[in-house]
Image (cartoon, rainbow, N blue to C red):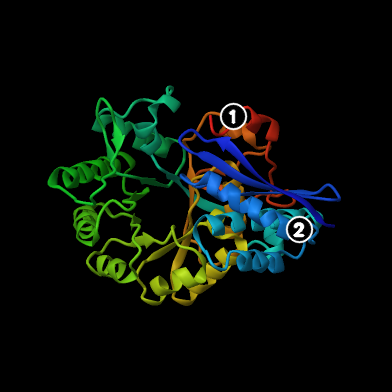
Amino acid sequence: MKIIKVTPIFCDGGWRAFTFVKVETDDGLVGYGECTDNRSSFGIGGCVRDLEPRLIGQNPMMVEKLYWDMCQHFQQNPGGVAQKAIAGIEIALWDIKAKALNLPLYELFGGPLWDKIRVYWSHCGTYRARNPELFTTKPPLRTLEDITKLGKEVVERGYTALKTNIIIPGERPRMFRVFDQNLDHSTLKAIDRLISTFRKAVGDEVDICLDLNFNFKTEGFIQVAKIVEPYNLMWLEIDIYDPDALLQIKQSTKVPICSAENLYTMKGYLPYLERHAMDVCMVDLPWNGYSESRRIAALADMYEIMVAPHNYYSHLSTFMSAHLCASVPNVKIMETDVDSVPWRDDIITELPEIKDGYLSLPQKPGIGAELNEKEIAKHPWPK
């Protein structure tokens, strides 16, 4: 079996492109991977095309060798869009290999450790506030009472955990973003009101996470951590590229700290893990690939740190992440987006089975679902 074609595929994802990779073989087997990011789809696609000549004629079953061949190709510009392209291709190769062996992918990693995975409702309210034109059937988030109703919706739909961003309700609700990374008193009070409202709405049994993204510097993150301490968060999520600064934040608070979704490879994660700079290590499978993500999880396990897959993409990524979660012992919980563009369900042949806040493992060979390219063609990117 030989690789005959490697193609990036783009689909309108509303505020971004869903970015996929399709690998075709001479015996008809096809593998799919996802490597979506919010801002650099064409850069990723260009890197995929750069790698295609290196892969044509190769045996797709030799996944690890091809992974390192691709890393060598981008040796002088590692990480970023190059790593995301490598990951998308590598995931598609694993899909092919598992299909060729007629096995669910997790069987190639030693078999599943469990048959279902706890998931949390991510970006709870975020997209409804930021992109209301895509959610015309959902109640607008104009007041804190609307936040209360959203929290109750989470409970009614069976989820046992949620994650939100800094949402500012109003006639024109918005997700908070700031250029200068300054934290003022009004924003701090808005965060307090938001998390207090969610906590009252969902009760004490549902976990809450707050994602602060890159919004503040160290002192701002410390202030937010202090103000949310009464609400018993599962974690406060922080993006920062200095492991010592992250450790300073962690040591300042009782709130568990989650970080690292923007890092690549074990080498990128090591400075954070060896400092114990976070309580929960977030790993992005579509940006790292299976081989690297499993190594990162093993490294985190050495430092007694749980991992949580970063997964806010299409359903294909949810299927992909399920196989990762099934095969590493130190998984805390998995992210999933409940809200998305209306056509997300149409562009894939299977839907994730989520019940009472748990995702059942895929049972079909490979990743367990195929892209519906005819439906994708109805939603081109760019629009």
Numbered tag placed on residue 379 in the rendering? 1
Instruction: Give the side of residue 190 with respect to residue 120, left or right.
Output: left
SS at mark 1 in the image:
loop
- Type of residue at label 2? Lys
Q: Position of residue 186 (x, y in %)?
A: 15, 42
Disc 2 crowd rating (10 Å Cα; few below 14, some 14-19, many 20+) is many
Q: Position of residue 80 (x, y in %)?
A: 49, 58
Disc number lying in front (2 or 1)? 1
SS at mark 2 in the image:
helix
Q: Which residue is mark 2?
A: 97
Q: Tell me if residue 375 comes above or below residue 31 in the rendering.
A: above
Quadrant of res 233? bottom left
Instruction: Give the side of residue 306 with respect to residue 72, left or right.
Output: left
Q: Is residue 322 among what the camera can see?
A: no
Q: Position of residue 290 (x, y in %)?
A: 61, 61
| Residue drawn where x is 65% and y is 30% of the image | 377
Instruction: Give the side of residue 371 with respect to residue 148, left or right.
Output: right
Q: Tell me if residue 70 comes above or below residue 355 in the rendering.
A: below
User: Is there a contact, CB below 8 Å, between mark 2 and mark 1?
Assistant: no
Q: Nearer the viewer, residue 270 or 139?
A: 270
